[in-house]
Amino acid sequence: MKTFVQMETDLRLESSLWVNNRRCAAVLTGWHFKWSEVDKKSRDKKTVSVPVAELVGVEEGKVEVLPHKTVEDTDKDFTVFYVKRSSSTGSCGLLWRLGRTQFSCPSRVLRDQWIKNLRTAVQTHTPLRPHRLLVFINPFGGKKMARQIFHSLVAPLFELAGISSHVIGKTEVFSNKILKDNGKIANCMVKKQLFCVFLVLLVTERANQARDHLLKKDLMGFDGVVCVGGDGMFSEILHGVIGRTQQEAGTCENDPGVTLQPCPLHIGIIPAGSTDCVCYATVGVIDPVTSALHIIIGDSQPLDVCSVHYGFALVRYSVSLLGYGFYGDVLVESEKHRWMGPLRYDYSGSMVYLSNRSYTGTVQYLPADPLLSSPRDNTRCLSGCTVCSRSTERLFPNSSDSGSLYSSYSGHFHNDLEGEWVTVEGRFKCVSLTCMSSSCTRSPMGLSPSAHLADGTGDLVLVWDTNPLSFLRFLYRHTSTDDQFDLPFVEVHRVKAVRFSLAGDTKEEGHEEIRELSDEMDIEAGGQVRSGSRNGSQQHLAENATGRVTTSEKKTVIPFTCCLCCKKPPAVSVWNCDGEILPFTNISCRIHGQLVRLYARGIEDKAAIHHCSQERDMCNITYMLETSLP
Ligand SMILES: Nc1ncnc2c1ncn2[C@@H]1O[C@H](COP(=O)(O)OP(=O)(O)OP(=O)(O)O)[C@@H](O)[C@H]1O
């Protein structure tokens, strides 16, 4: 802290600058860059204050970015790019846009001093800005627009921030990097602006290519991985990043009791899928420009991850929804109607609802400390959430500085599996577990509105069997602000771990199903499970470094085979794990606190930001009046 104060003092720069031919008083304090018109009456005077952490780039001359980048290279001007917020309708977060202001100085010397100081401030105070990024683009995700989204909206911003998106083509070779192109693998050249940043682009040609790349290729020197796609693509990258970290740490992911190592690589999500739930729940808006700006400034949002095991074999990781019963059935049904596009979810939801099914099972859960937080406490996990920050200290107790770089957490993770398990048994409409609110555009409050992104817990929602009308009421409440847990047949528990097993009369059928699936899925002792393919997009857990898994990929046998008009409803449902069907019913789940980090900062509180900026303006006005200008 002492050094920063010192740096802040060192970096102080104050002078008159001209914006649109109007004289402004400008001050750079290390943490903020502020300017306000000096010749206006004080009550009309407005101060613009940009945190240094939110500066995107500083360039010489008068720079325009729209419709194309143009630079008028004068020697007394410079242009500053920064994050500018605007509210958005229909989203819970704020849209970020690129702010731009051109400044003129009385002399070239002063101009150069401003540029140098602004760049130094950024380099000093934003240590998590990425310098090397690996970008994966799924050209088939969502509306198949991922490539265009990246090149038209994201690459220009990366370039401004010094992350050039000039693709090395067949005729161009940059530096000594030999690159494959023709649109498959392209490397980018680097232009020195704020930083020297290196970007590698990979447009995927098949499902799981990104995951395999992350598991097997040299990742030395990369700070982060950017995913341009939807939730399925994010999940692929999540598995790659976690798997690679455990491989390198020598941690056995198949052991359900093992403490997983937190991942040093950050993940950035540029939303370009048909469902972008993880992006929505961590940023508050589905907007490629907002997400790109979070990546550029190196925001860092820890995220809890749930591991799912079948016996001593890792099945998958989940961050948003792990749901049995209704949510599993809807996924199975929707897979049969992929041709309908996104409409298939509405159609399948209605069909499954009308079939009015429920399933027996035994749920065991390990409750989280009720004194820390509760799923019914009516709080929202927003940017700067105190529950999550306190959890960082609890999850990483031996870390000397819990605000320090993430890599320093390694090896200090606290294995928090103490407590008494609770067992409930009965007939459920659905059982679901989520590590985040899982809010999305359709359900702005999400599956569990008070769930936290990074507190090391998940919310377990048990919906007991009930009549169709009551269940509809429960489902409908997800689309409004009404409390979906305030119903007599619904329970919600904040938990650290969950086990599910088939119970009662379904036991035999369940075992049969698992035997069948075990035949389909080769599991070696201590090895990982490889599940089968779902329309080419299901992600499979890969062979680990030791090559213990040897099977080839096989077709998934979905146990839930009967159609909705069957006379006899199925006794067993399936698990929906972040949009993928799990091939096992009896599973154990465990939440790993802050296992990965995203280039995000959580959902910004619109009201607080507005209040804060008003206060800052007032404060700055007073400050300006008191400051004598040169
Ligand atoms: N080149 C590719 N060809 C086919 N599938 C791919 C390719 N690259 C990635 N995938 C797979 O496509 C799946 C879906 O991708 P993504 O999440 O980007 O799009 P989406 O439209 O949101 O998907 P969903 O079908 O889940 O709604 C992912 O599971 C990913 O593994």
Image (cartoon, grey):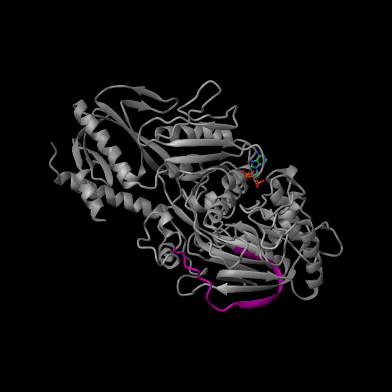
* Residue 627 falls left or right of residue 265: left
Where is residue 478, by image quadrant? bottom right
Number of marks in picture:
0
Does the magenta portion include 420?
yes
Where is residue 317, by image quadrant? bottom right
Q: Is residue 629 above or below residue 20?
A: below
Residue 501: where, in percent of width, then height?
Answer: 71, 71
Q: Is residue 558 above or below residue 512?
A: above
Residue 450: where, in percent of width, then height?
Answer: 51, 64
* Residue 427 falls left or right of residue 409: right
Residue 71: where, in percent of width, then height?
Answer: 36, 23
Residue 357 in sight in this render: yes
Q: Which residues are magenta?
A: 412-433
Residue in view at x 50 percent, y 52 percent: 282
Residue in view at x 77 percent, y 49 percent: 336
Front one among 502 and 67: 502
* Residue 161 falls left or right of residue 306: left
Front one among 421 and 425: 421
Among all residues in the image, which is located at the extreme front? Answer: 546
Residue 432: where, in percent of width, then height?
Answer: 63, 64
Does the magenta portion include 478?
no
Front one among 250 and 112: 250
Residue in view at x 25 percent, y 23 percent: 75
Where is residue 185, by image quadrant? top right
Image quarter of the C terminus? top left
Ligand 1 visible in quadrant = top right
Residue 484 in sight in this render: no
Front one among 1 and 101: 1
Image quarter of the N terminus? bottom left
